[in-house]
Amino acid sequence: MTALSLCALSLSGCQPTEQKTEHTAAPAASLTDARTKTIESLAGVPMQQLVSFDPKEIQQGGDTGITISSSESYSKPSSNISASRKGQFFIGNAFFKQPWVIAPASTDSRDGLGPLFNVAACQSCHIKDGRGHAPMDATDSADSLLMRLAMPASNDNEREQLKNSMIEKVAHPIYGGQLQDRAIEGVPAEARIEVTWQEVPIRFADGYVETLRKPTFRLTHAGYGALDDALMLSPRTAPPMIGLGLLEQIADTQIKQQADAEDEDGDGIRGRYNWVLDPQTGKQALGRFGWKAGQTRLLTQNQSAFNEDMGLTSSIRPHESCTKAQTACLNAPTGADAQGEGKARVEVSDEVARFVEFYTRNLAVPNRRNADDPQVLAGKKHFYAIGCQSCHTPRYQLPTTDDDRLEQHGQVIYPYTDLLLHNMGEGLADRTVAGKLPAKDAQVEFLATSYDWRTPALWGIGLAKTVDEQATFLHDGRARTPMEAVLWHGGEAQAQQEKVLTLDKQGRAELSAFLQSL
């Protein structure tokens, strides 16, 4: 039983045997020599330099970074972008922000919304290019949260295809792989997402109690018949858009170098990379985007989101997101236009897709604030002493590649992520429609299970609520603060969570100050 569940069951059972009034530092980290060498190799500097104040870290996004600390902190272009390339950014921004409309419409370049969809614009999920939030209650809309779906494999053929990343998942035969809770007129929406919250108290060693909140998600108003009890539900809030081009520039070898699926170094951390099918090339490749690392590149991530979130077709995703049983959806009008040269008629042209890709690649990471503040530096030492860098790899030196990603080439960045999958324990695992935990080996997105989550980048996290005061943290938005997110860590991160619980009031304030400085 985890420390979180122990405290939730009985506060008295988590009282320390001795009240401590002095400030206590976090215990020393159990980082292995192998992991330390890997981090130093990727960073190009010794661990001691990473732990202490490094002026270079102020520019988390390297030369792309910006100094704005306002509600617009996530919405500015890379600061090193040339004037001749800025036009592409702002055209992409227009397509990202403006709503698409139902076809047919006079707005020919923006029609084709639906028939089934979640939102009408990318910005509706990624509010001011930031992170989404979970519905506050059963009456709140789920605009910036969606529900991914998967069925357990039912035969050897499906198991073999999942094992070899030949398919993303076993989709539901009627509801598909993602729930669309909206639809155009004449087409039934698939269902409504509702959430209720339960308070979960957790006690620190000094007696301080933090109250977490645990969500229970339900699907109501099913539009196409009953939902199978075994159907696995994976709620996902929209992640922030900043720095994605920099994450894309991290070399596959730099990510694979950190993987330790068999825990050969014995530290309890079993990072795995997701091996996925690229929908454009049809070849298998390393996944790095999305909560389960199910997408290989920004281009495929964007076009998959256009298709599944807004019901828009593109050259990579040329078919409407309707299943064979959804006849009204299949027969609805589309906004598809001819693309020439024998290409399929689609709603998002290759030109629009390129503009949006350029935009999402060049949303700048805001520079750090107060990075040399003594409280922040003390919190940084806690972060490293606890061992958070076991998964949140701090620094990378990006390669210069033979492509047009000029702004990202050769940058030194501080994203604090390994881009690997980690089992985060039962507390954060997805549930089935019946509210049960799926089998631990049931794959829901290529190699990722319900227990697996890709390590999110931490840069910009301190400005999340400045950008949108409703912003939440973790995949399903349950955490209202970064500290709450830390306290939900389990599974491979259980040891680190338990170390956090030993921090006294001063230590907690220092760790929070460090996270807020990012």
Image (tube, grey):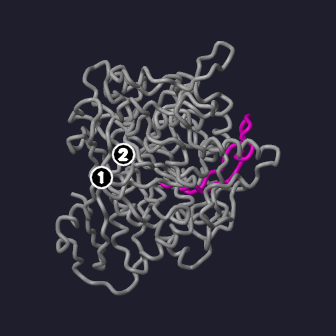
- Contact check, label 2 and label 1, Cβ < 8 Å: yes
Residue type, label 1: Val
Q: Circle 2: is it few (<14), some (14-19), or many (20+) Cα within 10 Å?
A: many
Q: Residue at x 26, y 52 (%)?
A: 216
- Residue 394 shown in magenta: yes
Q: Position of residue 244 (x, y in %)?
A: 59, 46
* Residue identified by numbered label 1: 195
| Mark 2 lies on residue | 235
Magenta span covers which residues? 392-416
**Tag on residue 217?**
none
Please, which residue is most extreme toward the bottom here? 21
Q: Is residue 60 left or right of residue 276?
A: right
Task: Point out residue 237 in the picture as x, y percentages from the top left corner.
Answer: 43, 49
Task: Tell me which label, 2 or 1, sits earlier in the chain.
Answer: 1
Q: Amino acid at mark 2?
A: Pro
User: What residue is drawn where x is 44% and y is 46%?
Assistant: 454
- Residue 264 lies in quadrant: top left
